[in-house]
Image: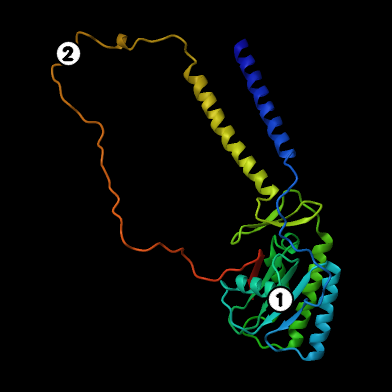
């Protein structure tokens, strides 16, 4: 009885040591030192604007909307583009189209900003999309489709007639939503978003926003927790199996279970228990393979999402 209690105490001490070690490892993840690809906003609001690809707005309305967009651009410290599309773009191509359009307008990649794509191309259902770059990937990139969902109530549904006056309120609401999200934003340790196509991580260290190809601190923490959990499970299985296996210390002679009087082998045979097969690779003259999927893709790191209406 005393040995069992002692063994339980030792198991608990072992578990406590493991928890302390892992907790210390999580708390001591070093500050990020990878290369930061992000290009901070330089204060130039002239590139923030309304792009009227559908040609709905008169010059007076467009001027007012541009003035409003640029005022929010200055306040939030990032580029803001609203693209009212009259060009048919498939849902699958919209993420690349918006990312490439944003980068071409800003002149470089990884700049702080957003591009809101409003689909008025005539396809049904329409697909609105928010593309984020730089620090906007962290502030707005967790659930960008939530923003386009909110704008849906301010926009005409697919197949319905509309005028510029039906769209202008949604653009104003969009700017106010950006401001609201920004005012409520707080740094979350180990949170990150990722542009999976280009392998770019976006996160906030509390001192600066990052866009980098190096794994984010949150990613390293996740890997560490998963590795520890799997290792701990395997370790405890091996531990208990081993302890159970060696619980009895008396050696047993298997010959005591054999009756020598009844065991009489009179026949011999060769039985093969393994078969070996030799294989030789036959080289062909065909060319190299190709990767699946179509062309396209976007160059810079972007995080985005959209919704139908």
Give the residue displayed 70% in from the left and 60% down from the top: 142
Secondary structure under badge 2?
loop
| Residue 224 picture location, percent across and down | 64, 41
In the rendered image, which quarter is residue 172 located in? bottom right
Q: CA distance from mark 2 to mark 1?
A: 92 Å
Q: Of circles 2 and 1, which is in front?
A: 1
Give the residue displayed 60% in from the left and 37% down from the top: 229
| Residue 296 picture location, percent across and down | 55, 71
Above or below: residue 268 compared with residue 140:
above
Give the residue displayed 62% in from the left and 10% down from the top: 2
Q: Which mark is residue 105?
A: 1
Image quadrant occupied by the N terminus:
top right
| Residue 27 picture location, percent across and down | 74, 39
Above or below: residue 297 compared with residue 222:
below
Give the residue displayed 65% in from the left and 55% down from the top: 213
In the rendered image, which quarter is residue 79 located in? bottom right
Above or below: residue 144 compared with residue 240:
below
Nearest the eye: 192 or 162: 192
Q: Which mark is residue 174?
A: none
Asked if the residues shown at circle 2 and circle 1 are in contact, with their CB atoms under 8 angstroms apart, the answer is: no
Secondary structure under badge 1?
helix
Q: Which residue is mark 2?
A: 264
In the rendered image, which quarter is residue 178 located in? bottom right
Asked if residue 187 lies left or right of residue 303, the reply is right
| Residue 259 picture location, percent across and down | 24, 10
């Amino acid at each position: 009885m005393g040995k069992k209690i002692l063994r339980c105490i030792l198991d608990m001490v072992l578990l406590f040591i493991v928890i302390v070690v892992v907790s210390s490892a999580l708390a001591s993840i070093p500050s990020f030192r990878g290369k930061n690809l992000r290009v901070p906003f330089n204060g130039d609001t002239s590139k923030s604007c309304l792009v009227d690809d559908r040609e709905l707005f008169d010059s007076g309305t467009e001027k007012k909307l541009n003035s409003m967009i640029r005022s929010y651009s200055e306040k939030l410290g990032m580029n803001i583009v609203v693209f009212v599309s009259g060009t048919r773009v498939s849902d699958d191509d919209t993420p690349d189209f918006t990312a490439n359009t944003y980068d071409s307008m800003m002149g470089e990649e990884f700049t702080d900003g957003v591009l809101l794509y409003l689909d008025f191309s005539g396809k049904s259902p329409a697909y609105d999309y928010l593309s984020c770059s730089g620090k906007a990937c962290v502030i707005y990139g967790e659930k960008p489709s939530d923003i386009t969902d909110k704008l849906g109530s301010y926009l005409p549904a697919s197949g319905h007639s509309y005028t510029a006056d039906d769209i202008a309120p949604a653009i104003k609401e969009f700017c106010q939503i950006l401001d609201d999200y920004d005012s409520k934003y707080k740094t979350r340790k180990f949170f990150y978003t990722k542009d999976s196509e280009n392998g770019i991580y976006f996160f906030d260290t509390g001192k600066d926003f990052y866009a980098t190809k190096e794994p984010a601190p949150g990613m390293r923490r996740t890997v560490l927790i998963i590795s520890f959990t799997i290792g701990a499970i395997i370790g405890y299985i091996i531990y208990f199996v081993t302890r159970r296996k060696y619980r009895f210390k008396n050696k047993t002679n298997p010959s005591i279970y054999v009756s020598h009087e009844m065991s009489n082998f009179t026949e011999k045979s060769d039985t093969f228990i393994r078969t070996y097969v030799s294989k030789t690779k036959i080289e062909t003259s065909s060319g190299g393979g190709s990767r699946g999927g179509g062309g396209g893709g976007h160059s810079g790191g972007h995080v985005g999402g959209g919704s139908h209406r």
